[in-house]
Image (cartoon, rainbow, N blue to C red):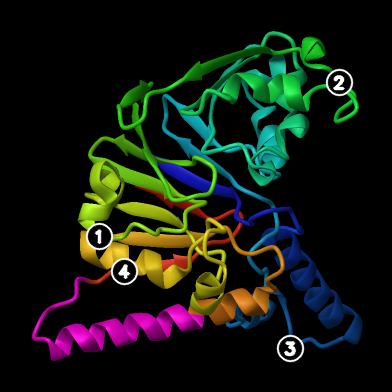
């Protein structure tokens, strides 16, 4: 099972992609070496230098909003249609969807604009012969396409889309098979109903938990939604705010990385990646959040040690656009 982040920002897009920025910096350094006549600087030297740069100085975290791709050799799932889905659509054109002979499954966590904004620019939608199958727990799913694809909001009405559009409401907390992927929706803590997804394939499990304030943290509070965080190999989790911002913005529906880290420690999650970065946050501020989480994790280790307990190691990182994982 492969997972790729196509968009990791919240609320609204603010691109360029990290890879585009990295390419520009690399090109500038190589051009400088060439034009300066510095024979001691070559591509290998440039790469060694760039490898040492921190993420806020080289590449950054990206600016497209939520879109996650989960794929196996048999199946592809797309979670959310934030602005990141636009570039994913271009990549899919190389396969059957580009010839009008393909189908794709699209799951929605909820319908706030940052999770829909890329949908009108998902090119496979406009190619006759394709089938776009849409799924969500919320019954409002049936209204999404007719609402977005009509004037004055968008020039192409839903009746003129080339692809066949299918919608299906899925049951909360009930597993559903998508090819060889088992998907179970669990409710998150967000002002409007929002559902995370737990996806299992060949004994490996991925949980997508974005747009959650994580107000419910104990096992009793989580109740029927606790399995979203249990027996998980990789969890992508909301970290729009720093801890102090999360305290100030109660009921805004977003969390801070240390909150997710506590969940991961308690439930034994092997790896957690923090995304949905605030659109107002610079790459430097996001990195500051990383260092805050680093200090928090070190403090937790000391507290466990002082209590005579062993803290299970959790691998964690801050996510960026283009990041990929294999489970």
User: Marks 2 and 4: CB-CB under 8 Å?
Assistant: no
Locate residue 236 relative to residue 142 in the image: left or right.
left
Residue 93: image x %, image y %?
69, 27
Magenta segment range?
291-312
Q: Earlier in the sequence, mark 3 or mark 2?
A: 3
Q: Earlier in the sequence, mark 1 or mark 2?
A: 2
The crowding category of the residue bearing disc 4, from other C-alpha atoms within 10 Å (few below 14, some 14 to 19, many at least 20), is some
User: In this figure, which residue is indicated by the disc labeled 4?
Assistant: 262
The residue lying at 31 percent from left, 32 percent from top is 173
* Cα separation between marks 1 and 2: 47 Å
Q: Decide which of 202, 190 is in the foreground and name it.
A: 190
Locate residue 251 relative to residue 151 in the image: left or right.
left
The crowding category of the residue bearing disc 2, from other C-alpha atoms within 10 Å (few below 14, some 14 to 19, many at least 20), is some
Query: Within the magenta stretch, is there residue 105?
Result: no
Q: Decide which of 308, 64 is in the foreground and name it.
A: 308
The residue lying at 18 percent from left, 83 percent from top is 304
Task: Between label 1 and label 2, give the one nearer the viewer.
Answer: 1
User: In this figure, which residue is indicated by the disc labeled 3?
Assistant: 40
Locate residue 189 relative to residue 173 in the image: left or right.
right
User: In this figure, which residue is indicated by the disc labeled 2?
Assistant: 156
The residue lying at 85 percent from left, 81 percent from top is 32
Task: Between label 4 and label 3, give the one nearer the viewer.
Answer: 4
- Up-down relation of residue 196 to residue 247 (above or below): above
Is residue 167 among what the camera can see? yes
Q: Earlier in the sequence, mark 4 or mark 1?
A: 1
The residue lying at 40 percent from left, 72 percent from top is 258
User: Marks 3 and 1: CB-CB under 8 Å?
Assistant: no
């Amino acid at each position: 099972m492969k997972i790729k982040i196509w968009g990791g920002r919240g609320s609204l897009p603010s691109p360029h992609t990290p890879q585009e920025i990295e390419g520009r910096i690399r090109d500038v350094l190589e051009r400088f070496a060439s034009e300066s006549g510095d024979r001691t600087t070559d591509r290998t030297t440039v790469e060694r230098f760039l490898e040492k740069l921190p993420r806020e100085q080289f590449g950054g975290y990206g600016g497209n909003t939520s879109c996650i791709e989960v794929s196996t050799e048999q199946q592809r799932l797309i979670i959310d249609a934030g602005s990141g889905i636009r570039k994913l659509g271009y990549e899919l054109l190389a396969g059957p969807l580009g010839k009008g002979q393909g189908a794709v499954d699209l799951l929605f966590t909820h319908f706030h604009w940052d999770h829909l904004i890329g949908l009108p620019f998902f090119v496979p939608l406009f190619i006759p012969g394709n089938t776009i199958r849409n799924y969500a727990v919320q019954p409002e799913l049936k209204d999404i396409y007719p609402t977005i694809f009509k004037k004055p909001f968008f020039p192409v009405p839903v009746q003129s889309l080339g692809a066949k559009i299918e919608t299906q409401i899925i049951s909360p907390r009930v597993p559903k098979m998508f090819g060889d992927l088992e998907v179970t929706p669990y409710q998150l803590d967000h002002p409007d109903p929002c559902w995370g997804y737990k996806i299992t394939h060949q004994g490996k499990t991925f949980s997508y938990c974005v747009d959650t304030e994580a107000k419910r943290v104990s096992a009793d509070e989580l109740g029927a939604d606790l399995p979203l965080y249990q027996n998980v190999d990789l969890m992508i989790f909301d970290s729009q705010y720093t801890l102090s911002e999360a305290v100030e913005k109660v009921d805004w529906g977003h969390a801070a990385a240390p909150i997710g880290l506590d969940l991961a420690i308690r439930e034994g999650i092997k790896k957690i990646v923090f995304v949905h970065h605030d659109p107002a946050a610079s790459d430097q501020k996001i990195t500051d959040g990383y260092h805050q989480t680093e200090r928090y994790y070190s403090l937790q280790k000391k507290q466990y040690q002082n209590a005579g307990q062993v803290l299970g190691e959790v691998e964690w990182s801050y996510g960026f656009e283009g990041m990929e994982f294999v489970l």
